[in-house]
Amino acid sequence: MKVLITAGPTREPIDPVRFLSNRSSGRMGYELAAAFVREGHEVLLISGPTAIDVPERADFIPVEKAADMYEAVDQHLNRMDIAIFAAAVADYSVANVADNKIKKDPDTLTLALVKTRDILGSARSDMNFTGTLIGFAAETENLEQYAREKLTRKGCDLIIANDVSKQGIGFESDSNEVLLVHSDHSEALPKASKHDLAHQLVRTILEIHLHKSAPAG
Ligand code: CTP
């Protein structure tokens, strides 16, 4: 199977030395990439900056900005069987990136932000992807409801949702506790290391893919 995975945070520049970013470690996406590679699949990992080694035998495109991640995904998505969007993409970028370092003259500074393009949300509509599409949802409330809305709105086959208000899971942690939101049901998985969870997710994602690709009747 050919599998594209986005991972890590993005960095949205403010000026030549500063950026806006988030707390994503990239661990879940990298564990998924490693698990697919171990099971013999062809993986393309498109990732923002992380401190993790790229899994051996995975193809790798490093990116910084959300706009660069969009371009890289757009270029490669259509030859993929499965696409998994684990990246914590910045929802906003700085409207006017300063050419020179901003000096601290004024007492307050206001940055105008503009929405970035939703990469996962463009996979079906703008990029015409017909393969198996998996998204993530990080929520602090109404986990299942918000994840299900994302599943429908972004045309996904599965949303892997986690409650980021819980301590010890998700962002900056080695473990995770996720709710799998399928089109017709949801399933809560017990807390597990991201390594073990990745293997379980690979099995689930391959099952969804085979079921989706099986001829009807
Ligand atoms: N995502 C993406 N491109 C973006 C923003 C998000 O590909 N510009 C993907 C993430 O990789 C993840 C999913 O969309 O798989 C979850 O995105 P999220 O930001 O939580 O969803 P939104 O629809 O932006 O909703 P909200 O921020 O309001 O929760």
Image (spheres, rainbow, N blue to C red):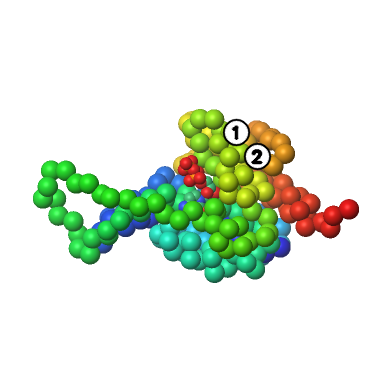
Residue 58, percent from left and from top: 59, 64
Give the answer, above or below, for where 80 lies relative to 171: below
Which secondary structure lies at badge 2?
Answer: strand
Could you say which is closer to the camera, residue 63 or residue 193?
Answer: 63
Q: Tag 1: Cα neighbours inside 10 Å, few (<14), some, or many (≥20)?
A: many
The amino acid sitting under disc 2 is Val
> In the picture provided, is 23 more to the left or to the right than 74?
left
Q: Earlier in the sequence, mark 1 or mark 2?
A: 1
Rendered position, 114 above or below 197: below
Q: Mark 1 and 2 residues: CB-CB less than 8 Å, in contact?
A: yes
The residue labelled by disc 2 is: 181
Q: Percent x, y for residue 48? A: 45, 57
Residue 204 is at least partly visible in this image: yes
Q: Position of residue 82 (x, y in %)?
A: 66, 58
Residue at 53% across, 34% down: 163
Residue 213 lies in quadrant: bottom right
Left or right? Give the position of 204 relative to 192: right
Q: Residue furthest left?
A: 105
Q: Nearer the viewer, residue 184 or 35?
A: 184
**Which quadrant, please, contains the N terminus?**
bottom right
Give the total number of marks visible in the rendering: 2
Q: Nearer the viewer, residue 38 or 84?
A: 84
List x then y, in percent, for residue 115.
39, 51
Q: Is residue 45 above or below residue 146?
A: below
Residue under the point 67% across and 60% down: 130
> How would you rate the neighbour count of disc 2 (Cα within 10 Å): few for under 14, some for 14-19, many for 20 or more?
many
Q: Which residue type carries mark 1?
A: Glu
Q: Residue shown at 35%/52% (left/top)?
A: 114
Residue that carries the numbered disc 1 in the rendered image:
144
SS at mark 1? helix
